[in-house]
Image (cartoon, helix red, strand yellow):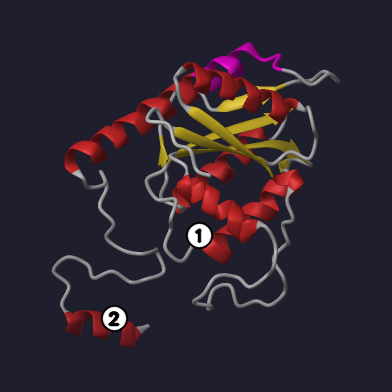
Amino acid sequence: MNVHSEAGTILAINGSERVGGNTDHAIAYAGRLIAERGAILRTIQLREHRISPCSPCGDCNSRTVPCQLDDDVPALVEQMTNADGLIYAAPVHGFGLAHLMQVFIERAGVGYLRFTRPLADKVGGIIVTGRRYSDSSVHNQIVNNLLLNRMILVGSGFPVLLRNTTATPGLTDPEGIDALERMVHRMLDMVQLLKRHQRVDGDPVLPRRDRNERVPRPRRNESAQTRGDIENVH
């Protein structure tokens, strides 16, 4: 059953394999902040789901229907589509994005999201946990993925990079915690603004001018003959 809050429903996608690790702590803290605002946080624990890696079929860029691999990704994409905002949370592993999140964004992206970009205009946030190195690189990768899906990233100061160099999981980075708090509040502010606009105007804030970036769009003052000439050249 989908229960939505007028203050907003945020879905956190947890890409950590470790139960009770730093990423779990960060999401739990975000959940408390969200609850204080009267909003709802739901969490997808990727480690609890069956997510197939992309297969060697090689037709991702040519197929016109969603991927046929049988796993939990379609149901997870549906939850993402129903949320007002999404937080992608993942640790750094081997100087890069943790395997679970990497597999998921590949499967969800080329298998489902690229056809109509159903996450467009949803408010996005990112949490990256790690020891010290490569967290900004991982953050940048997720930023690019959210922008590809036409989501709204609300600037809130420093990115949420939570560092912990101890062996005990927990929130030990005061500057990172401050960034997390700012991001969550800014996300909820934007979610509520978008909801208010929708109630008043009945239309989305940002118009949908095309289905996805793979469908050519006529450029302003470009005639059909000109487009045909360009296509023939290339």
Can you give x and y, in whole percent of width and height, for residue 201 in the image? 17, 41
In this view, 152 is above or below 67: above
Task: Point out which mark residue 135 bears.
Answer: none
Give above or below for 175 relative to 155: above
Q: Which residues are magenta?
A: 171-181
Between 111 and 157, the one nearer to me in the picture: 111
Residue at point 28%, 57% (across, down): 208
Secondary element type, mark 1:
helix
Horizontal relation, residue 70 to residue 62: left or right: right
Q: Which residue is mark 1?
A: 113
- Which corner quadrant of the image does residue 194 belong to? top left
The residue furthest bottom is 232
Residue drawn at 58 percent across, 24 percent down: 31
Mark 2 residue type: Ile
- Classify residue 220 as left or right of residue 116: left
Q: Residue furthest front?
A: 1
On the image, the x and y values in percent for residue 231 come to 32, 83
Res 71 quadrant in image: bottom right
Residue at screen point 82% across, 18% down: 166
Q: Is the magenta region chiefly helix, strand or loop?
A: helix
Residue 61 in sight from this viewpoint: yes
For disc 2, the neighbor class at 10 Å (few under 14, some 14 to 19, many from 20) is few
Secondary-structure class at tag 2:
helix
Q: Which mark is residue 230?
A: 2
Q: Looking at numbered disc 1 in the image, what kind of residue is underneath it?
A: Leu
User: Residue 193 location in percent, x, y?
Assistant: 30, 31
